[in-house]
Image (cartoon, rainbow, N blue to C red):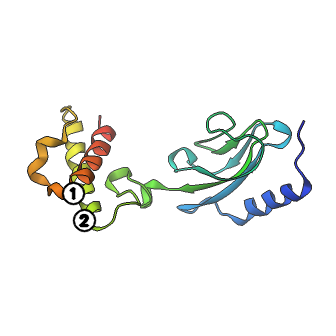
Amino acid sequence: MKHMSVFKALIILSLTLGFAPVANAGEIACSSFQDQFNRCPLANANNLDVKLTQKLDGKCKKDHSWGADSDGVWVDKGCSAVFSYNDSQHGGGHANNRCPSDLKGNECEYYKDGYKAGAKDGKASMSNFYGRHADGYDSRFEPYFARGYEAGWKKNR
């Protein structure tokens, strides 16, 4: 079996202690010691945008040797890594009519308009066709409206 060096273990321990998993965004280190399953506590991690940002040891493959669930980030099969997370319900993502972080200004506003229209259509069991709202957006911003519409429609189906 693979054994992690003491140096790597100390780095992981210091990283784990250095990050508070209660904030809206941050990092958490998690390690599978001796190829065994381990869960690192992070409340509602399944609702956070968890990404592997730095592999420290082993093979790390999402949903195979690492993942996130309601209790935290889990690792298995020797995966040791640092993971970033972002609470998409508090500004980092697009849940609940919030803009994705890559949109700014008018792009964001058209996204929100599209989201509202898509949510309304989704609740009414209408088809997923944003074109019926063509009079509600400037054609220069159609991609952002369409993206918001799709997110709102899917969320409310």
Question: What residue is shown with label 2?
Answer: 106
- In percent of width and height, residue 36 lies at 81, 36
* Residue under the image location 24 percent in, 37 percent down: 122
Instruction: Name the amino acid type tagged 2.
Output: Asn
Q: Tell me if mark 2 has few (under 14), some (14-19) or many (20+) residues whose alpha carbon lies within 10 angstroms of its own.
A: few
Res. 84 mark: none
Q: Quadrant of residue 19?
A: bottom right
Please state the horizontal and vertical placement of residue 145, each as a whole percent of the image: 23, 51
Which of these two is toward me, 106 or 139?
Answer: 139
Q: Amino acid at mark 1?
A: Phe
* Foreground of the two, 76 or 60: 60
92 sits to left or right of 41:
left
**In the image, what residue occupies the spot 65% across and 63% down?**
20
Q: What kind of element bears circle 2?
A: helix
Q: How far apart are the two marked residues, 2 and 1, measured between alpha carbons?
A: 8 Å
Question: For mark 1, what is the residue?
Answer: 141
Could you classify mark 1 by the number of other residues whose Cα lies within 10 Å: few (under 14), some (14-19), or many (20 or more)?
some
Which of disc 1 and disc 2 is earlier in sequence? 2
At horizontal 79% and vertical 40% (from top left) the residue drawn is 78
Q: Image check: 129 left or right of 21?
A: left
Q: Position of residue 76 (x, y in %)?
A: 74, 37
